[in-house]
Amino acid sequence: MYFAARAYRDRERGDRRGGGGSRGGRFGGRDGGSSGRFGSSTNRDNSSFGSNNFKNRQPGERLRKPRWDMSTLQPFRKDFYQPHPNVTTRSLHTVEAYRSDKEITVKGSNVPGPNIYFEEGGFPDYVLSEIRRQGFGEPTAIQAQGWPIALSGRDMVGIAQTGSGKTLAYILPAIVHINHQPRLSRNDGPIALILAPTRELAQQIQQVASDFGVSSQVRNTCIFGGAPKGPQARDLERGVEICIATPGRLIDFLERGTTNLRRCTYLVLDEADRMLDMGFEPQIRKIVEQIRPDRQTLMWSATWPKEVRNLAEEFLTDYIQINIGSLQLAANHNILQIVDVCEEYEKESKLMKLLEEISNEPENKTIIFVETKRKVDDITRAINRYGWQAIGIHGDKSQQERDYVLNQFRNSRSAILVATDVAARGLGKILF
């Protein structure tokens, strides 16, 4: 697999700023985010809200902040962890050696020891059966250390890169949490809410939730902008235990009264740094206001900037922080990265020469990342003119078009995929 990372960068920022909307689909597209880092001014997915009037008001301004009276709230249980005998008898030296080997660092009080083997997590048999069916050998580092913390009902921050297995680290405890709560009644909202920055990540999370929730009859739905609201609204109205959502579309449904978060006791913020980077902080704050203060909150991030730290301090209580690897972004040493600095007029010829070299390799699937949707279309046409089969994906593609493109690439009918970085985010687990 080859990645041409930003071989083309559109220097006319107007195209990027003006073309962020999307009509439908499964992958890519920003959902109600704001331009700039941690900004809140430009709506990028008007379809999430159904009206351009949204540009003239603040996200969630029609939502009233509940006045929580803890003395009247129904108590709920969130500590289900029973340490396995292996965990309780494991020496501190063994625990520290495991954490060192897996590059796990922990910060907080009363941190439970890691579950080195799946059987140590205390999960129900149906969960362990699905784990074995999917061929997992042993827990990843974030799973091993995250499960006992989440199952203990503690708030936590998990800092780990994409591909670390973090989705399973919060989905399995969510299922256990849900199964210990009273069943949903009519007009109840979800028990577990998972917020994600993009549609493609939300749908990846939903797939994991479906795989492991089916045996326990834990229902889920995926709420994101750019798709018809009707089916999503019907799912919410029928009742689901897990709601996976992008912030913009969820705000829309909350304002419309389609659902509520009064029953929510398990909150996950996945890729928190990415959500803040896309300008979702106002939406996140409005959503969290709707959830009872004694909830359990799990925040996941690839980086640990000041903005994410501040959010954690505000939303989490007595939390444990887990870090896998370095807190700083670093190059993946398993990937050979070659940077070719060239003039604008040289880019096309250099790209075609590179593609010719790659085409002679046995594994010649190639993804080319570009910054704008217009560049996706331009580069795709240019590559096809040179005789290669290239396909493009970006936020303006319909869901049917996206599915077709991904199937073509997955099945090697077209070996070259041109994509915007937002549309391509997280596609690795889906395409290969």
Image: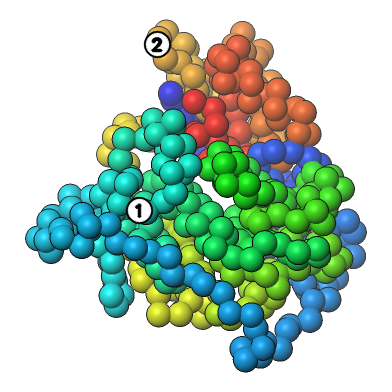
Residue placed under numbered mark 2 in the picture: 361
The relative height of residue 286 versus residue 70 in the rendered view (above or below) is above
Tell which of 175 and 401 is nearer to you. 175
Mark 2 or mark 1: whose residue is earlier in sequence: 1
Instruction: Answer left or right for 376 relative to 349.
Output: right
Residue at 71% across, 62% down: 184
Q: Estimate the x, y position of residue 290 in percent, counting from the top left.
A: 69, 75
Q: Would you call the spot at circle 2 few (<14 residues within 10 Å), some (14-19), or many (20 or more)?
A: few
Q: Amino acid at mark 2?
A: Glu
Quadrant of the rendering where the N terminus is positioned: top left
Quadrant of the rendered structure where residue 156 is?
bottom left
Q: Is residue 101 left or right of residue 281?
A: left
Q: Is residue 226 left or right of residue 76?
A: right
- Residue 168: x and y in percent read 46, 48
Let me know if residue 417 appears in the view: yes
Residue visible at 50% across and 34% down in the picture: 429
In the image: residue 85, left or right of residue 301: left
Q: Secondary structure at mark 1?
A: helix
User: What residue is at 78 percent from the left and 40 percent from the top?
Assistant: 24
Q: Taking 253 as reference, is 200 above or below it?
A: above
Marks 2, 1: nearer the viewer: 1
Residue 246 in which image quadrant? bottom right
Numbered badge on residue 121:
1
